[in-house]
Structures are given as structure tokens and as C-alpha cells.
Image (cartoon, grey):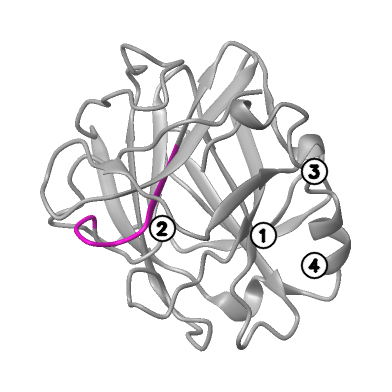
Amino acid sequence: MKISTLFLGGLASLAAAQTPAPYTDAKSGITFNYFAHSSGYFFGIALPENSTGSTDFIATLGGKGTGWSGVSLGGVMLNKLLILSWPNGQSIVSSFRKTANYGSPAVATGTFTQTPIANGTYVNGTHWTYTFLCSKCILSDKTTFASTETAPSLGYALNAAAPAQKTTPSASVTKHTAQGQVVFDLTKAKSKDFDTWKSWAVPPKVARDFEG
């Protein structure tokens, strides 16, 4: 499995979308507050039972086909922490990015990391799913939602076209074909089982395979 790069191509003019709802993944057993788009895109988030002050969450991100799916942890695209993923064969490619301009953003670096949860990460004939622990991903610099928020707006974007260089960490990704902004009820994302689920996140055996 390779975790590499990220892009969100213009979350400007974000629109309201379907309301997220609790959803339990059949493979991992993790329950998320979960948003699904008509395209096949989805994003879900799970938090500790007492999440105030926590900087970690578990997420699931995916879609249909070979295109990319992305999320803005701050709602809009510009100057926010972004995560984008796509399939590469039976592997998943994903990374953080940040940009001050519309277009393909540079890879973002920091103390934040992504660690995959294997029993919730897969590619099959209908869709792909990337489930991961996002550590130190809730920041205090307003580039993400805050740990004290109960109803933050998160941005989503997607494109059904695969990146031209889908194995390359710095691959450019074409502009989204669908995008929007969704209000998540984080009270429905909290679980007493969070620490158990978190323990399933295992760093890759080969460190270079995952960049985040």
C-alpha cells in the first residue's frame, strides 16, 4: 500500500449537501458520522468519547472507479489542511496538502500524520476505501475545525479521472468535477470504542511507502 499525495482543485463556491449520518463499516466495524455523495464519494469521521482537546480522529475516505476523493478539514480550499486519496491498483495513495491559490496545491508538511487501518482499507470491483488514523490533525491555527466544535463545515471534492502520475507523491491532479461543503454533527461521531479502533492503526513496514 502506498500513501503519497493530495489535491483539492477549487473548493470555492461550496454548496450545502446531504446530511451526514451514523454509519458502521461492515469490514472494520468502525462507526462514523458519514457523508455519501451521489457520485460514490464518501467521507466519515470518528472521534473519542471525550474529544475536547484531542487532536486525533479516525477517518474513512473513498469513492468509485480510479478517480480522487478529497476533504478540506477547514471547509474551504484556500489556506486549509486538505487530504486527498485515490486508488493505485490494490493500493491507496494519499497525503496532506495546503495552498493559498486555486490549482494543484503543494504537499503540506507538519506534525500531522496518516496511519492506515488495514481492515478498513481496500479496493474492490465497485469502490475503494481508505480508513486511517489522523494523528495531530486537529490544529489550533484555524486550518482545520477545532476540537471544541460540534458542527463544523467540512469541504469535499472529487474527480472521476485518475491522476496522470498516480504513483508519484507530487502528482498533479485535475480540477474537481463535483464539490461542496457539509456540516457534520460531531456529537454523533464520538465513541467509547475509539481507543480500540485507534489501536488497529499500524505504520507501514516500509516507511517510504507512506508519506503524510
Residue ID at (42%, 74%):
145
Whole-angstrom CA distance, mark 2 to mark 1, is 15 Å
Looking at the image, which is closer to me, 40 or 72? 72
Whole-angstrom CA distance, mark 2 to mark 3, is 32 Å
Q: Amino acid at mark 1?
A: Phe
Front position among marks 2 and 3: 3
Q: Is residue 127 visible?
A: no
List the residue tagged with mark 1: 32
Q: Secondary structure at mark 3?
A: loop
List the residue tagged with mark 4: 194
Q: Secondary structure at mark 4?
A: helix
Residue ID at (62%, 20%):
91
Q: Quadrant of residue 188?
A: bottom right
Q: Position of residue 77 (x, y in %)?
A: 23, 55
Q: Which residues are magenta?
A: 77-84
Whole-angstrom CA distance, mark 3 to mark 4, is 15 Å
Is 79 magenta? The answer is yes
Residue 18's tag is 2
From what the image shows, is residue 79 above or below residue 141?
Answer: above
Residue ID at (72%, 86%):
50
Residue ID at (52%, 49%):
43
Q: Position of residue 143 (x, y in %)?
A: 33, 69
List the residue tagged with mark 3: 202
Chief secondary structure of the magenta portion: loop
Q: Amino acid at mark 3?
A: Val
From what the image shows, is residue 193 above or below residue 77?
Answer: below
CB of mark 4 within 8 Å of CB of mark 2?
Answer: no
Q: Amino acid at mark 2?
A: Gln
